[in-house]
């Protein structure tokens, strides 16, 4: 990784931090989630950068992949997870934070558990440490609060234009004894009062290009060309496509999904419908040291 690449990763992290601070300040009880999403997106535009993926605003038992769509009436409430990222020329950041609008001790402790697990996981990124050792640190920290770590969600390596790439960072002692290599990683513990397993829920409205093979429908082809040019392999929101192309894009997106051009992500819901907290940072791991990119250096 050369100096120019590192600079781009650092910029993406710096902007990700700024946008997360803005999102946390802007999120108010009873504010429509779609309004919060649009305010955050406008702030990203002001910085002259792009979203690394559609902002996830997931409440309570929905752990991830909940992004508000046009007409959604869900509001900021209960245990809200904000998961967002910034793209600087395809160099991506990924960061998440949880807010408690219920003001309960349980939710406060859930947030503390995932935050402390994240801090300890980052500290444990050292030379000759295995993926399983990182996962063990996360799991033991969350268990110490009396909660379960969500085992079938994980952190991940990040590469240019690829938010989930290469290695996964487990949230439990996985048995993967491979040593962590240099690279960009998103570390993201999830804590829950439930059993620590998520399952597919409703459609999220989050899509990603997986194949540019031909499609017969001309309007669908137009949208496919736009997606290739505008997003490449970065996830995007159905809401963005509807705003640009109108409601007739609904059918085109379905056709593109059916033709296996696009992947449509499902919401990820805790199996026993119990609340989940989420904390995440992007870090650069090099020469046995971890540098957190989505934190303020000052």
Image: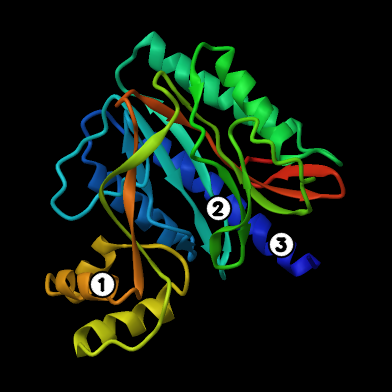
Q: Residues within 10 Å of mark 1 (few under 14, many from 20)?
A: few
Name the residue beneath numbered marker 3: 7
Across and down, in percent, residue 119 comes to 66, 28
- Quadrant where the image shows the N terminus: bottom right
Q: Residues within 10 Å of mark 2 (few under 14, many from 20)?
A: many
Decide which of 149, 238 is in the foreground and name it: 149
- Quadrant where the image shows the C terminus: top right
Query: Mark 3 or mark 2, which has the lower sequence index?
Result: 3
* Residue 258: mark: 1
Q: Look at the picture and state if 124 lies above or below 19.
A: above
Across and down, in percent, residue 193 comes to 41, 18
Element on which disc 3 rests: helix
Which of the 4 quarters of the picture holds residue 214?
bottom left
In this rendering, the label closer to the viewer, 2 or 1: 1
Element on which disc 2 rests: helix
Query: Mark 2 or mark 1, which has the lower sequence index?
Result: 2
Question: Rounded to the nearest whole Å, what is the CA distance between mark 2 and mark 1?
Answer: 35 Å
Name the residue beneath numbered marker 2: 15
């Amino acid at each position: 990784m050369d100096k120019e690449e590192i600079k781009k990763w650092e910029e993406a992290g710096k902007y990700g931090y700024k946008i997360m601070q803005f999102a946390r300040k802007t999120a108010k009880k009873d504010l429509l989630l779609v309004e919060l999403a649009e305010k955050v997106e406008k702030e990203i535009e002001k910085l002259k950068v792009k979203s690394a993926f559609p902002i996830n605003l997931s409440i309570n038992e929905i752990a991830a992949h909940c992004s508000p769509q046009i007409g959604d009436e869900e509001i900021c409430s209960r245990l809200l997870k904000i998961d967002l990222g910034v793209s600087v020329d395809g160099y991506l950041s990924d960061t998440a934070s949880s807010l408690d609008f219920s003001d309960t001790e349980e939710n406060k402790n859930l947030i503390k558990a995932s935050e402390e697990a994240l801090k300890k996981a980052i500290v444990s990124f050292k030379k000759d440490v295995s993926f399983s050792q990182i996962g063990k640190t996360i799991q033991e920290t969350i268990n110490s609060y009396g909660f379960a770590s969500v085992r079938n969600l994980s952190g991940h390596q990040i590469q240019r234009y690829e938010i989930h790439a290469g290695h996964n960072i487990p949230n439990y002692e996985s048995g993967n004894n491979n040593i962590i290599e240099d690279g960009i990683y998103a570390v993201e513990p999830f804590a829950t009062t439930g059993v620590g397993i998520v399952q597919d829920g409703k459609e999220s409205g989050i899509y990603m290009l997986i194949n540019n093979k031909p499609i017969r429908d001309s309007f669908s082809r137009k949208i496919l060309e736009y997606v290739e040019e505008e997003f490449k392999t970065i996830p995007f929101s159905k809401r963005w496509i509807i705003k640009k192309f109108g409601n007739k894009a609904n059918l085109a997106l379905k056709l593109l999904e059916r033709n296996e051009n696009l992947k449509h992500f499902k919401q990820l819901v805790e199996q026993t419908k119990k609340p989940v907290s989420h904390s995440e940072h992007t870090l650069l791991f090099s020469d046995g040291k971890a540098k957190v990119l989505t934190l303020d250096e000052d």
